[in-house]
Structure formats: structure tokens, C-alpha cells
Image: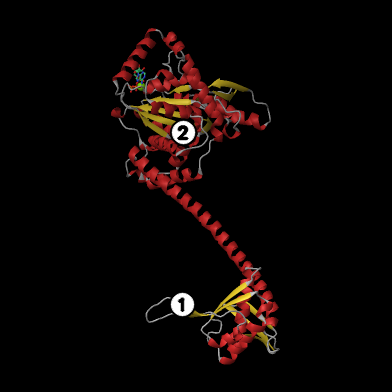
Amino acid sequence: MGSPMQKRVSFPFSAIVSLDKLKLAILINAINPKIGGVLIQGPKGSGKTTAVRGLTDILPRLEVIKGCPFNCNPHDASNMCEKCGERYRKGGKLPIEERTMVVVNLPLGATEDRVIGSIDVEKAIKHGVEALEPGVLAEANQNILYVDEINLLPDHIADDLLDAAATGWNVVEREGISVSHPARFIFIGTMNPEEGQLRPQLLDRFPLSVSVERIVTVKDRMEVVKRNLEFETDPEGFIKKYKTSQDEMKTRIARARKILPEVEMPEELLEAICKTCLDLKVDGMRPDIVISKAACTLVAFENRSKVAPNDILVAAELALRHRTREGGFLEPATPEEISKVFMAKVKEVKYVEETKTYERVIESLESFVSVLRVTQDQLRDEFLKTVNYIMNHIWSELYPYGDFSEIRILVEKDYVLQLKGRRGWVNVDLVSGGERSLASLALRVAFSLAFTPNLRWLILDEPTHNLDVNAIEHFGRVLRDRMENIIDQVFLITHEERLSDYITGSIYRLERDKEMDGVTKVISS
Ligand SMILES: Nc1ncnc2c1ncn2[C@@H]1O[C@H](COP(=O)(O)OP(=O)(O)OP(=O)(O)O)[C@@H](O)[C@H]1O
Ligand SMILES: [Mg+2]
């Protein structure tokens, strides 16, 4: 029969020297029983058994239904034995008992009856599960099931454990009678691989695995010796000495349990976990799930709130070191391989995240650009309205005849300047030269006035370019007779000698010897 390990004689967990990975693997199981266990491999005498036994003193409290031989969980109706389930359904108040979680040892030589329980067939027909004499699996429900030298366990016992570990139930069948009870336990196995390998089915049942390394520093080895001698000489005194650190560890576990549900796993890291498992060709989905559970638990143990890449690396090594890949054709991934693939995936996912950020920036820039365009259109419309208003105002001054009553500029594909005749609007390139020159003068003046509302001077550079004689004369007359109503002064720069007849102010003649590339000189005024 399995028995909870004796508290008094355990070497304190916190007195174990080094072995950090092993301790961590055990502790995260104690914090989060849903992880489900760990396989510890290592050479003989490396502290495997000591670490598991040491756990006894720091385990948290748990609640069971009082009097139930199967340690049923009072808060989980779907995982109660037949009797507790019936009491629960009838609405009876289930008495709760608080206990400390225990490590239940499964001895190598245990018979099947001792493991799964023995059944009195006669009694079972009448009383169901009550006829079951509970075995190790009953005791292990909600607790830790420890199998030392698990690689040496007889196959039929290993099969019973496998079934229970897979389903969370222990089913006992005898002569057509079947009774069952919940058997959900944290499964811890230890083994020395030199003494034989573990069956792949059993291996895969372990959510995590850890290889205990030899302690290689003399200082640490001396410390191991000293502590062990001290413990042997005065166990109680030694336990007292480590009481504070044991209590601290208990508090830490309890606090981690409390904050665990709040730990956040960033979406991109979860994506990196799944990509890593896919890339490493790990079999099944268990690894992805257990890595994320273990990483969150690790974070809770360190009193943090959000998973970081390094937590996943630690969890992934624990979860993948024993798992074959590609249906068993590939050896388990090495820590280097795991780290390399995972870091590449983190970068990939981060890159995708960054790209998404840039896309968002581009998107908002694009909407900024379209807002600018709309603003630009509106400003141009407003500007043209002003220009048109001014042009029409001065048009009647510049053009006293009746042929064209209005002028406007508008945007079609390009800017178009138009005059309104008797038959409607016409583009200025279709009217006579004189009218065209006045229209363009009106446009220049209006543009200048729109930009500079208190415009006093206007400079006209070659305004009669390409005009015929009539048009030049017409333009000259307007310049002379009408411009003064609009502008104080006009500076005219022109090659057109004929315009000198219309000038009311000063005329300066400028000349330059083009052949000699000479400077421009004022020759008369
Ligand atoms: N890191 C350690 N810190 C303290 N004591 C240790 C450590 N490693 C080993 N020991 C001590 O060494 C002895 C052997 O350890 P243990 O029985 O746990 O080894 P094991 O790995 O279970 O070996 P086996 O495979 O032979 O069962 C124990 O007395 C234990 O207290
Ligand atoms: Mg051992």
C-alpha cells in the first residue's frame, strides 16, 4: 500500500544544494497541479529521490470531501466518485476537510490490487464503489503520485498508471463488475537511465522532464557532504535550522498559486510557442499546452505578471527534452535547437507585429494625406472664388465694351480662363488678341490682389507678347485710361515701342550690347 512519506525524516527541500532546474520543475507542479507532473532522470545518488521527498514539507493545502476514501474534490462535480456525486446531486451539503497535499509513494513491488484497489464482487453488486478497497491511485487523487525507478515498473502496473493518467479516472473491473473513482494526480517519476529506458507511451505521459546534472564544483560538493552529515547527526536540529527558508518557500508557493490566474501570456509569444512546436515537428498538441502552462506558472513563481520569452525557453526545455518527434522518427530536440528555433520564431512574430504597426502608421498617414487633399481642394476653391470676385470687379474697369460681360477662371483638367459672351462662356484662346490680353491682365491683377490685398504697384513683364497691332493699341488705352482706378502704379517692362504712346509716367530706355555680352545701360529717360 502506498503511504504518505514521513514528514520528520525528509531532508529539507530548501537545503538541497544547486539542482535549480530540478527544483524548479518540481515547484511549478506544486504551484499548478494542472501541469500534471515531471519525469526526473539522472545518475544514481544525484539527489532525485531527496528532492521529491523534500517536497512533502512545503506542499500547499487542498480541500477534500470529508470521509471520502478517494479524496474527492468538493468543488468539481464532474470528478467525484459515485457516492459523492450522488450526494452532490441530491443537494446535500458536502462536508469539506482541509489537508496538506501529500506525496504518495508507489513501491516497485506493489501488486495491481494495491495500485488500483481491490474489489469485493458480491458487495459491489449491491453497493457499487463502496465495495472498493482503495489503492494507491485512490490515495493519489488530488495529490502527488511518486514512482521511484519508474523504468523498472512492471508493464501491467505501468498500463494502469497510464490509463489513470490519461483519463483522470481509475476504473476497476472484475467479473463483469466495473467501479470507478477520480484519480487526478501530479505524476512524478524518477529514474536512472543507465538502468533501462522508459516505454515511449509512459514517457509521453510526463508533461515535463528534467535531467539532473552532476554537481561539478568542489565547493558545492563539499556543501552537500556537510549538510548531509549534519542532517544524519541531528535531523530535528537540521530541520529547525531550515525552518525559515522552508516557510518562505511555502509562502512563495501559496502566493504564486493565488496570482497564477492573472498571469498574462502575450498573443505573439503564444504564437511563437506554437510555431516552435510545429517547426520542431513535436508530436501532438500536449507540448504546446504544457509549455504555456509551465511558462505562466514560472512567472507566478517569480511574482511577475506577464510571460517573457525567457520563461518560455525554460518551460520549453522542460516540456520538450523527452519528446520524440515526427511520430518517433526524430530524437527529442536539444536545448540549443529549442532555443534557436524559438528565438527565430519570436523575431518572426515580432517582425510581423512591427509590420502591423507600420501598416497602421501608413494607414493613418494616408488618411492624413487625403485630409490634406480635401483641404487643398477647398483652399483652391476659396482662392479661385476670391480671384473670380476680384476679376469681375475690375473687368468692367478694364473692358468697357458690351461683348463680354463677365470673366472667370475654373479648374477642369487644367486651369481655364473664360469670358462670358452673348452665347455663353468661351475660353480666352478663342477670343481676339486684345480681349485675351485684357483677360490675362485681369487675371494677373486679381491674383496679385488676392495674395496681397493692399497691393499698390504692379509689374507687367511683356504683357503684349504675341498680340497684333489692334490688340496692342487696345491694351495701351486700357493701361493709360483705366488702370489708375485699380492700381497706384504700373511698372511696365516691354520691347513694344508702340506702348510708349500710352505711358503717362516716366519711360526709361535700356540697352545692352548683346554681341559683346555687355551690361544693361539706361540710355534715355
Ligand atoms: N544536491 C544535493 N543536495 C543535498 N544532498 C544531496 C544532493 N544530491 C544528493 N544528495 C544526497 O545524496 C544522497 C543520494 O541522493 P538520492 O537518494 O536522492 O539520489 P537518487 O538520485 O535518488 O539516486 P538513485 O538513482 O540511486 O535512487 C542523499 O543522501 C542526498 O541527501
Ligand atoms: Mg532514488
- In the image shown, does 507 or 31 lie closer to the viewer? 507
Please tell me which residue is depicted at 28% across the width and 28% down the height of the picture: 194
* Disc 2 crowd, CA 10 A, few/some/many (<14, 14-19, 20+): many
* Disc 1 crowd, CA 10 A, few/some/many (<14, 14-19, 20+): few
Please tell me which residue is depicted at 54% across the width and 26% down the height of the picture: 255
User: Does residue 470 appear to the left or right of 165 in the view shown?
Assistant: right
Please tell me which residue is depicted at 36% across the width and 21% down the height of the picture: 47
Circle 1 is placed at which residue position? 521
Image-quadrant location for residue 154: top left
First in residue order: circle 2 vs circle 1: 2
Looking at the rendered structure, the secondary structure element under dot 1 is strand
Identify which amino acid the numbered label 2 is placed on: Ala
Q: Quadrant of ligand 1?
A: top left
Residue 447 lies, with reference to residue 287, above or below; the image says: below
Q: What x and y, as percent, mark residue 490? A: 60, 76
Circle 2 is placed at which residue position? 165
Q: Which dot, 2 or 1, sits closer to the camera?
A: 1
Can residue 502 be spotted in the picture? yes
Please tell me which residue is depicted at 29% across the width and 19% down the height of the picture: 218
